[in-house]
Amino acid sequence: MRVRFLLMSIEQANALPPRWVGMASHLSKRIPSLSTSLRLARLPVLAENYAGAAILSALTYGVLFTIVFGAMGFYTNGGMALSAIQLGIVGGLVSGVTAMGLHLLYPLLLARQSAQKVDQGLIFTLRSLQIQVNSGVSLYDAMTNVAKSEYGIISDEFGHVVQEINAGVNEATALERLALRTDSPFLKKTIWQLVTNIRAGSPISSALESIVNALAEFQSRAIKNYAGELNMWILLYLLIAAALPTIGITFMVILSSIGGSSISPETIYLTIGGAFGVQIVLIGFIGSRAPRGYA
């Protein structure tokens, strides 16, 4: 198993020398959320082993980019060794620190992606459970059927619950463990409500019905809110994509004619490139705010 941008696999991280892992444990202790993020991201590695792999990977990136930037500085500065060394050191440090931050942040991103995937299939899973329970199927059998279905990560989670029940854990405790290990707020609320109903002896079908209705209402509100925001984001996108670059270049032409100077092609390319870059960031931001997997 590999983590994107990390130069070591999870298996290699687990096989790191104990002395190196011991030194890296100081970093993992300073970031308590790392262990939780690794668990929620379903990465089978201890926090100290992952921190050790991240340090080695960041050091490798730093050395590699030190050589690259040093060579670039050597050729662009006419063979001046001092300038090349300075550029190489700065480029290597920036690259190494950036890589280290990315490595430590990536498990958190994976955990959030996992929670989003759970949310995407949650309402379909709950409707399936509700239909089965209303038809007279027990909650255990309904969860078994969900585990065998293709609901993605949520099927795996219920499969784990079924395995624990088969191993002798009672139903409420197995569901509690699911609520504790998931990062999805919707699934947490759902499971805790089911656990409360199981221990109180209340009908599961009524609990599932109320949960499905509440989740459907929340998702409907989220879609309406996003549709209302979208008009503002479209206006902002058109302003950045068309209006600002055009107006900016026009003003630069006018000012250059008044001042007697000229606009270099590099300035125009930089303006267009900057506007293009902002557009990409804005498109990604708008896409990230869209409600996912809502029915």
Image: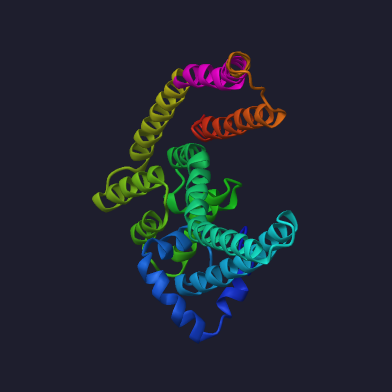
Q: Is residue 178 visible?
A: yes
Residue 221 percent across, percent down from the top left? 40, 24
| Viewport quadrant of the N terminus | bottom right
Of residues 203 and 226, the one nearer the viewer is 226
Q: Would you say residue 232 sits in the magenta stretch?
A: yes
Residue at 72% of width from left, 28% of height from top? 265
Residue 177 placed where, x, y %?
A: 38, 60
In this figure, what is the number of numbered marks? Answer: 0
Residue name at image x 43 percent, y 49 percent: 138
- The front one of 16 and 67 is 67
33 to the left or right of 246: left
Point out residue 239 in the picture as x, y percentages from the top left corner.
55, 18
Where is residue 74? Give x, y as percent. Answer: 71, 61
Can you say whether 248 is above or below 23 in the image? above
Q: Which residue ends up furthest to the left in the rendered image?
A: 200
Majority secondary structure of the magenta segment? Answer: helix
Inspect this view and state whether residue 1 appears.
no
> Relative to residue 264, is residue 192 depicted above or below?
below
Snapshot colouring:
rainbow
From this view, report whether residue 261 is shown above or below residue 274.
Answer: above
Looking at the picture, tell me which residue is in the foreground, 206 or 53.
53
Name which residue lies at 36% across and 31% down. 214
Is residue 106 part of the magenta span, yes or no?
A: no
User: 135 or 65, which is in the foreground?
Assistant: 65
Highlighted range, magenta: 229-251
